[in-house]
Image (cartoon, helix red, strand yellow):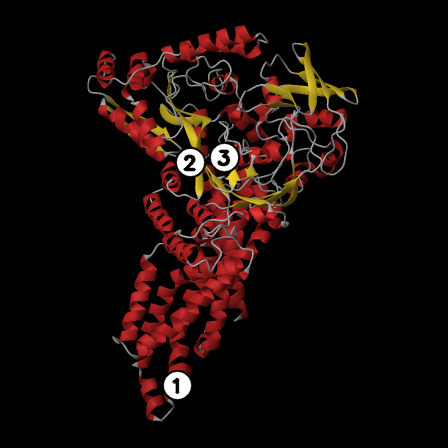
Amino acid sequence: MKTSWLKSGIASVALVAATGAAWAEKANDTLRVAFTKELENVDSFFNSSREGVVLQRAIWDGLIYRDPVTNEYKGNLATSWEWIDDTTLELKLREGVTFHNGAPFSADDVVYTVNFVSKEENGVKTQRNVNWMESAEKVDDYTVRIHLKEKFPAAIEFLSGPVSMYPAEYYAEVGPSGMGLEPVGTGPYKVVSVVPGQHFVLEKNENYHDSPKGQPEISNVDIRTIPDVNTQMAELFSGSLDLIWQVPADQAEKLATMDQFTVMNESTMRVGYLNMDAAGRSGDTPVTDLRVRRAINHAINREELVNALLKGKSRVVSTPCFPSQFGCVEEAAKSYEYDPEKAKALLAEAGYPDGFTIDFYAYRDREYAEAIMSYLNAVGIDTDFKFLQYSALREQNMKGEVPLAFLTWGSFSINDASAMVSQFFKHGSLDDARDDQVLEYLNTADSSTDPDTRIENYAKAIERITDQAFWAPMFSYNTNYVFTNDVEYTPTADEVLRFTTMSWN
Amino acid sequence: MLTFTLKRLGLAVLVALTVSFISFILLFLAGDPAAALAGETASGEDIEAISRLYGFDRPMLVQYGDWLFSALRGDFGESYYFRLPVASLIFERLGVTMTLGVCGISFALLTAVPLGVAAAIRPNSLIDRVALFLSVAGQAMPSFWFGLILIVLFAITLGWLPPSGASSPMHFIMPTIVLGYYAMPAIMRLTRAGMLDVLSSDYIRTARAKGAPEGRVLFRHALRNAIIPVVSLAAVQMGFMLGGSIVVESIFALHGAGYLAWESIARNDLPTVQALILVFSMFYIVFTFLADVLNAWLDPRMRSS
């Protein structure tokens, strides 16, 4: 955005002007939060937004829960689970849980939810979240079996993440559109009202079961969509908002100097990387040469990008996955130190002593892409920069028309390497490496239920991918949370706001 | 007059259809609707599944024909993004946009016309200079900047007005000023130029010579003629305000039709964009038509032509 510098200027004026102390709606026990993006549908199976995940965790529960700090799996709507065989998971359900509309929770709800969402024609937006399930079957009122299509070790992670349980009778009646307007779940917060995309009001579920999420403390949560970050800050200053998140680094730095706000930074699972068309789908470009791909890896000063641009809890990443993910073995990755001379030498060796010109694509974070570009230019690689809308770049990507691109991936907050590396290196439409060896390792890792076999094979895949420099992994992202001093909250590393862990000071 | 009106209406419908067809094609050229719909977290397989589900793999003309056929029967379909009926989605947001548009144009007219008349009565006087300054400033200031400055002043420093939202009339004061101020300079300059022109014409001299009071000369004789091009301009500005108040709606978090259009284009939400384009073209058509009628009332010569 060309105008962003001007906007930050105004924000500085606002900072100076903000003399009055901010006051939270502590007296009314109402936490006021801003979303930046219009959420498409509150029904969590029919949105793919961060905002959607936030509401999902507040309104609904999954069968299982992963503690965001210890990464330990705990029972939520299920109390225990065991694998009957490689593709059958049996779960014992918690008794005495009721939905917000008073309907009791039982095996029928699980069966209905799983059978509905796993059918492709029902159009769940992120198919990957659900298409590993074949169906569910009721054993008795509080025992269910989930049948998988094939072996899928990340099942427990998915059941504790995007797969929430819906009330069978109500969902059958109202469907995804009705659920989006009047959501009903078992979660710690009940929905009072929804204005699609604009305004969401939640209230504490007084009958919340004994869940590992903990009991909600704050009685009401009022969420408004305010697209402009500067307006969000103005609301914060004037005391009509208590918490904002996804605040850009430069604004957060200024806010941190003010006494009445707490600014916290946490990393996210999003990884930025350069994708190189090693297989030559876009034609015989220089990046089909291994030496060129290694040269590009050597050409970029990742430390400097992190320190000067991303800041906060961002870090240099050398793996094609986020390091906390299961199977993302950092030691296996070949890392390329910043060495422009070596890059030039490799280019010369590959037959490009004077460099070359290549199309370079990006869809977000223009300033990062431009910084990367200047490193490439410094070793003699001229870039023809194409900044496209996300959907346009993805389309060209899928058709195999993109030789070099700066891309990012957030793994949908799934803490398993399969959510990243297996999305891109298994010969799908986005795979520009098309390496058979990597495919073999990933197939073994993705389908094995033995953790050691999985780790071993992900490590092999990571080693091969980084040795062949199919990608140039760069850095992880971070996000800033800003709230008034009345609010007590510790953000987690998965970029999900959890209202249950918030309280008043 | 009736054949003239019918002809113009027929032409307007053709214009609306052409605009909708072109925009449909442009949206397809701007990127794969399935990828836009799937969002940034989607894998290649998700995108392919969505493409099959929504029929994006069919020829573009077939898809347009489908949409047109339903639209002609009054069915605008379901928004790909919100999964809600497009008609209700737009209807819900039109209230905010209309309120803002009507307030904005009223603010613009109520400030611009008196200022323009005053400036024309005494050219190069202090009031003319002030009017000139105001119009240059209005033309030069970007709306987002002016909007944020107002927020800083009235919402944060003084605390008189709420910074954003649409839940009370108070919420509309700043957006009205920002939006109206953007339209004001053109209207004021046109009023001033028209008045200057008319005031030096023969019939005004005659009116003065026969001893008509100055107020009657100014408002009954002069302004009535000078205002004709202003009415046409205001109609266009009104259309613009209803469809193009994107920046203002975004800064003040108003969630009107303009912002919906902007966001829907970014998301390739075809049914919503198509319906909005029809609504916006209807606005332009209706306002231009109303302006013609109003001008015909102001100037009897136009009625016969």
Q: Earlier in the sequence, mark 1 or mark 3?
A: 3
Q: Is A96 left or right of A493, judged from the image as shown?
A: right
Instruction: Identify whether B270 is placed above or below A340.
Output: below
Residue of label 1 = B215
- Subunit under mark 1: B
Query: What residue sits 44% from the left and 34% below the top?
Result: A264
**Furthest residue toward left:** A354
- Where is residue B227 drawn, in percent x and y? 40, 74
Query: What residue sits 61% from the left and 42% below the top?
Result: B78
Residue of label 2 = A389
Query: SS class of the residue under badge 1?
Result: helix
Query: SS class of the residue under badge 2?
Result: loop
- Where is residue A151 drawn, in percent x and y? 61, 12
Instruction: Identify whether A462 is placed above or below A209.
Output: above
Judged by depth in the image, the label closer to the viewer, 1 or 3, is 1
Name the foreground residue: A43 vs A19. A19
